[in-house]
Image (spheres, grey):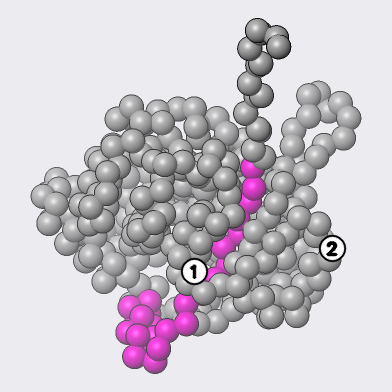
Amino acid sequence: MSSMKQKSAPPKELKPVALILAGYDKFDSRTKLKKMQELIEAYDGDVIYMGHNKFLHRLEGKPIIQYVLDAVYNAKKSSPKGVGGRNRLYEKIFIYNDIKSFEGVIDLSKYSNVHLHQMTDSVGGHWKDFYFNYIEYGQRVDVFFGDTPRITSEDVEYVHHEFSKIIGKEKDHRGSLINMVFGIVDYEDMKDDNWLDHRIKYIKRGHNKGKLKSFVGYEGLQVRVGNTGAVIKNKANDPLMEHESINYIYNLRKALSPSTFSKIVYHLWKSKHFDMIRQVKNKCIREKDFYDAVFDIIAKLNKIDLSSYGGKLILIKKHAARWENDIDGPMDLNVFQQKFREMLRK
C-alpha cells in the first residue's frame, strides 16, 4: 500500500442560478380593504394591483414576465477577448408564479433550464422555500422581479458582474464578509430615461419641501429600489431566511405607505435609534447608521445573531430606470404598452 497521501479533490464549483420572483398576495376581503386603503394613500390615489397576476398581462404580444425571463435566459458569460462561444450565465432559472396560469400563456419547452414553482406565500416565504430547498451551501443566486420588462440580457450581465465584484469578496464596515446585496437606483441616474413620470411626486410643504415623496433620502442621494439583488447560501444568512426577515428589509426599501413608515419609526424608537429616526424623517440617511439600525432591529425582533452577516446596497449606475420601472398598477401598464408600441414603430 502506498504511503503517499491522496490529494483531496478540489471543491466542486457551484454555478450561479437565477430566481425570478413573481408571486402576489391573495388577501381575505377585510385585509384587502385595509391594504388597498394604505396603498391608495401611499400612491396618491393610483390604483395598485392586488391579488392579481399582473405578470401575465401582455405587452405587444408577450406577457410582462416573458421579457424578464428572456433577458435572464439569454444572458451570457463573458469570454476572454471574445474567443469562442459564450455559455449561458445561469445554470438554472427558477420562477415563482401560478403554474396553471403561467403555462397557459408561456411555452416553457422553449427554455431548457427553467423551473417553475407554485407561488404560495409572501416574497419572504418564496425566498425561504427556494433558499432552503433548491440551492446548495456556497452557491450564488441572482434575484430578479417579474414586472420589470425593460431589462435586457446586457443589463442582467452588467448587474451580475457588479455583484461579483462585491459579494463573497468585500467586507462591510463591521468586518463581516458581504454575502447579500440589494440593488438601488438614484433619481439623478434614472430621470432622463424614466418612463413612469406620473410616479415622480414632490413633498409640497414642511422642512422636506421639494424632496421626492416616494424616494428614500440618503446623504446626497434620493433612491428607490432597483429590482434585483444576490445572495450566497451560507450559515450567516440562514437565520434571516428562516425568520423571513427579508419581508422587513423589502418594506424598508421604499417605506411608501403611512403604516409601513410608522412601523419603521416605531421599531427605531423601541431599539433607541433616536438619531436614525431624525435621519429618516429628514430624508437624509447615513448609510452606515442605516445598516447598523436594520441589523440591530432584526436581531432583536427575531432573537438571532447577525454578527457574522454582511449585507450591502449597490447603486446601479447603468440603465438605472430599467430596474426601477416596474409595473404596480394599470396606469404603469398603460404607459408601458404605449412605449412598446412606439418602439416597434421606429
Which callout, 1 or 2, points to the residue nearer the camera?
2
Task: Residue 83: give x, y in percent of width and height.
Answer: 86, 26
**How far apart, in angstroms, are the residues tagged by discs 1 and 2?**
36 Å
Quarter-wise, where is residue 213 in the image? bottom left
User: Disc 2 residue type?
Assistant: Lys
* Magenta stretch, residue numbers: 16-40
- Quadrant where the image shows the C terminus: bottom right
* Mark identifier at residue 110: 2
Give yes or no for residue 180 being in the magenta stretch: no
Q: Please give the name of the residue rendered at 33% of the width and 27% of the height, measured from the top-left corner.
A: 175
Q: Earlier in the sequence, mark 1 or mark 2?
A: 2
Residue situated furthest right in the rendering: 84
Q: Is residue 66 left or right of residue 255?
A: right
Q: Position of residue 279 (x, y in %)?
A: 21, 48
Residue 251 or residue 317, whichever sits in front:
251
| Mark 2: few/some/many CA within 10 Å (<14, 14-19, 20+) | few
Crowd tier of the residue under label 1, counting other residues whose Cα lies within 10 Å: few below 14, some 14–19, many 20 or above: few
| Quarter residue 140 falls in | top right
Residue that badge 1 annotates: 198
Question: Is residue 327 found left or right of 103 in the rendered image?
Answer: left
Tell me if residue 224 comes above or below residue 140 in the rendering: below
**Three-letter code for the amino acid on which mark 1 is drawn:** His
